[in-house]
Image (cartoon, rainbow, N blue to C red):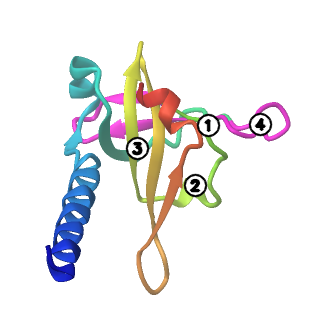
Amino acid sequence: MKKSHIIAIVMIVAAIGIFISSGSDMTTFSTFKEATATQKVVKVSGDLVKNKEMYYDEQENPNLFTFYLKDSEGQERKVILNNAKPQDFEKSENIVVTGKMQNDEFVATDMLMKCPSKYKDEEIYVKSKETASIMN
């Protein structure tokens, strides 16, 4: 076999591997109702419920932040993020959380916030260190 054939085969295998691995994160947006029904890892987009309690105690547990989110259907759920509270969290316009329902709470492994900016929209991505343990 020629070197060019071997290189081409290796590149094709690598491209297939990249395609398969990126396909695992191509979940569609769901609601809390759908997340409860499926019990699988989903993405829920919603707005922060500002009149309900947000909990973050840096001294007690710096990797625990809880807040309430209202999805596109108007359903509110408590979200538990195993990570630190992002800076300017209260200013976010839209929040996308990735995770799954456990009992009546949504346990998030990742969070993406769309924040208002004077000149352009900024997105802040927060990924939990315990993603593997929640997804199993």
Q: What element carries label 4?
A: loop
Evaluate if marks 1 and 2 touch, with contact meaning CB atoms under 8 Å apart: yes
Does the segment drawn in magenta span residue 68? yes
Residue 37 is situated, as x and y percent measured from the top left of the image, at 21, 18
Circle 1 — which element? loop
Label 3 or label 4, whichever comes before in sequence order = 4
Q: Please give the name of the residue rendered at 29% of the width and 49% of the height, measured from the top-left corner.
A: 25
Q: In this view, does 33 lie above or below 62?
A: above
| 1 and 4 marks in contact (CB < 8 Å) | no
The kind of residue tagged 1 is Met
| Residue located at (24% from left, 24% from top) | 33
Mark 1 → mark 2, Cα distance in angstroms: 10 Å
Residue annotated with mark 1: 54
Which residue matches tag 4? 57
Question: At which x and y percent is residue 3?
Answer: 21, 80
Image quarter where the C terminus lies is top left
Task: Look at the picture and state if 53 lies above or below 5.
Answer: above
Label 1 CA crowd tier, 10 Å (few <14, some 14–19, many 20+) = some
How packed is label 2: few (under 14 Cα within 10 Å), some, or many (20 or more)? Answer: some
Amino acid on which disc 2 is placed = Phe
Which contiguous range is marked in magenta?
56-78
Q: Which amino acid does label 3 sit on?
A: Val
- Residue 97: numbered disc: 3
**Disc ID at residue 86:** none
Residue linked to disc 2: 89
Which residue extends farthest front? 1
> Disc 2 vs disc 4: Cβ atoms closer than 8 Å?
no
